[in-house]
Image: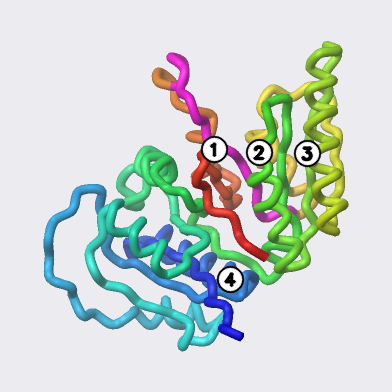
Amino acid sequence: MEEKKKTNIIALTDFSEYGNSAVQYAASLSKVFQSTLTVISHFSFSYHSKPTADVPMPEHLKNAIALYMNSDDVVWDTAHYDLRRLMAISESANSIMFVLGVSRKKKSSFFNRKHAIRFIKSSRLPVMTVGKKLPNASIWKNVMMPIDIDRQSKEKALWAGYFHRFGGATVHVLHTVFKDEFLKLKLADNIAFTEKLYNNLEIKYQLHEIKPTIDDMDAYSLRYASQINASLTVIMMTKYYTLIDLIVGTKEKQIIANKEQIPVLCINERDDLYVLCT
């Protein structure tokens, strides 16, 4: 029987504190998902043909990765990539996720919020955004999946569930309450779908009812995280922009690079979204 090809996780670093953090988070994820790790050191949105610099991986990155995985499963890639070339290599490497270190300030990291959203919207892979705070020993033991009245994505629920299937995490399903009967019914349908899916897949989860009514459960999950020692929230990206989104920014703009420095797994609503085969 042909051996199943290992999955891969890609971290992008610019050698800032945020880029270094992305590498360490990606290494910890590689341990959970039993994946290889590829570290990309040169990325820009505009492609400029440049010779590949044969520069060794810095010792501090080697040491950070060694906390989680064997060096034989790590690829240090110093080629220059733009979006098109990076997405192509992610396919060939059987990649399942990108990890970016995202800063609220423009000059602290290549991936400020604007650049990060542009990158995420172009990806069929989930993209995890992290701050400069490094992961701790209990990382990925509790993850959050906020749900609301919008049509719930099966892929969002599946990706939250993978952290239990691979790492034994508890998935905390957060939802608010509504007085309006129509909204109550829509929310109840979404909760029922999630419960049925998780029960069928034997995923450990807890429901958390949040009162009074919360308008933005994704943003609220960041404030709630400390109550359940959660280290990740899973969100869907805005698919269609409204005029308000264009003026003040989408809701995820405030969630990625959050002040709490909680990692955010961002998933696009698209027909060709990558889903793990397990």
Q: Are marks 2 and 1 in contact (CB under 8 Å)?
A: yes
The 10 Å Cα crowd at callout 2, few under 14, some 14 to 19, many 20 or more, is some
Assess whether mark 4 and mark 2 are in contact (beta carbons under 8 angstroms). no
Q: CA distance from mark 4 to mark 1?
A: 26 Å
Would residue 257 be found to the left or right of residue 17 on screen?
Answer: right
Q: Residue at x 35, y 64 (%)?
A: 89
How packed is label 3: few (under 14 Cα within 10 Å), some, or many (20 or more)?
many
**Residue named by callout 2:** 153
Residue type at tag 4: Ser
Amino acid on which disc 2 is placed: Ser
Q: Earlier in the sequence, mark 2 or mark 4?
A: 4
Relative horizontal placement of residue 222, taking residue 53 as reference (left or right) = right
Percent from the top left, x then y, of residue 9? Answer: 49, 67
Secondary element at tag 4: helix
Residue 235 — which label?
none
* Location of residue 120 with respect to 242 vertically, above or below: below
**From which residue to which does the magenta span run?**
230-245
Residue 231 painted magenta: yes
> Among all residues in the image, which is located at the extreme front?
1
**SS class of the residue under badge 1?**
loop
Please say if the residues under marks 2 and 3 sit with CB atoms less than 8 Å apart: no
Q: Earlier in the sequence, mark 2 or mark 1?
A: 2
Q: Which residue is mark 3?
A: 174
Instruction: Count up the numbered dots.
Output: 4
Mark in front: 3 vs 1:
1
- Verify whether residue 172 appears in magenta: no
